[in-house]
Amino acid sequence: MALIDLSNYKPTFINNYRTQLLLTKYTNQNEGKIANDFWSTWKSQVENITPQDIDWIMANATLPPTMMNSWLTSFTDFVFGKVTDGWSGVAEVGVEQMNENLDRVLGIDLSTSAKAKAAEYWSSPFVIDFPELAASMENWIDLRRSYLTEFLTAEQATSVTQLIQRGVVQEGINGTDLGKQLKDVVGLTPREETALSNYRVKLLNAGVAKDRVDSLASTYSNKLKRRRGNRIGRTELSHAYNAANHTTMEQAIVVGDIQQPVVKKFYAAQDERTCQMCNDLHGKVIGMADKWRSATEFNIDQEAQYPPVHVHCRCVVIYTLLGRKV
């Protein structure tokens, strides 16, 4: 990640801090919708656990193939529906605001350029004038939803497998207790499953009655699931928004609307919730094709060309024309 010193150039900033404010406003308004839909998906998965599933786990100490297939179908329906709608909505916001910024900086109306006039509107949830840009965003969404579907299914399988190994294999719990704990674990990450298990052990060691432990554990589990739903909602909206900004810039370069070199300036949300990682990256400038060396829980790559650089990240990129050296 080679840093660039803007003081050596006459830079022109294509977008500004309002890009981050727009992301924050949109995620605040819409992440809860995705979180609620996640909650409904997990609830449905819990309701679909059958006595036959419990019997299989007790007899084989493994995850039933039918349960894995059911989760994959459930997550596929959810991601290809509700989450894709969220990506498409915030991507439209990103594309529109970046094109407006480009119009202002370049002094042309990109929406009425010769290439745009000849383009047909994309038959997707959001409408874009440029077919190349539409195809790039459609490809991003295809990759992202396939990845997220597989990731959610595999992570849930890991969490439940942890429960099976500890509860059935090591502790020898009965089918009734397994069923109760399984319902609490569906929707949790492996780390959260461990935290829930530790919480149960702490309560039992403190002499809390078993029925009360089950009740408190379920309450704690629901709290973790709510948090996770919001976390995924914000992170995924940030991914799509920043991907739309980046792809818009890439296409403007490819079609020749931008002739000067373009660099990326990391811009972190400026408030008390900003983490040290993003504070350290704030203001750093790299080349258009370079990557920020920080990974998020839901990244396809270990390095990112644009935020989010971690879960719950609210950062954006300020795209900059370098201009001549001074």
Image: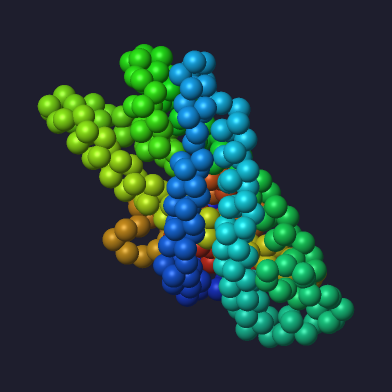
Residue 216, quarter of picture: top left
The C terminus - image quarter? bottom right
Q: Nearer the viewer, residue 13 or 132?
A: 132
Residue 261 can be seen in this image: no
Identify which residue is drawn at 36% across, 33% down: 180
Q: Is 195 placed above or below 82 here?
A: above
Q: Nearer the viewer, residue 301 or 72?
A: 72
Q: Left of 145 or right of it: where is 218?
A: left
Color encoding of the figure: rainbow
Identify which residue is drawn at 26% across, 35% down: 214
Q: Nearer the viewer, residue 211 or 245?
A: 211
Give residue 4's position: percent from left, percent from top.
55, 56
Give residue 40's position: percent from left, percent from top.
47, 53
Identity of the residue furthest to the left in this view: 207
Q: Is 312 placed above or below 203 here?
A: below
Residue 275 can be seen in this image: yes
Identify which residue is drawn at 54% across, 49% down: 292
Figure label count: 0
Give residue 92's position: percent from left, percent from top.
62, 71
Q: Nearer the viewer, residue 171 or 90?
A: 171
Identity of the residue furthest to the right in this view: 118
Q: Left of 62 or right of it: where is 140?
A: right
Identify which residue is drawn at 19% across, 26% down: 204
Give residue 13's position: percent from left, percent from top.
56, 73
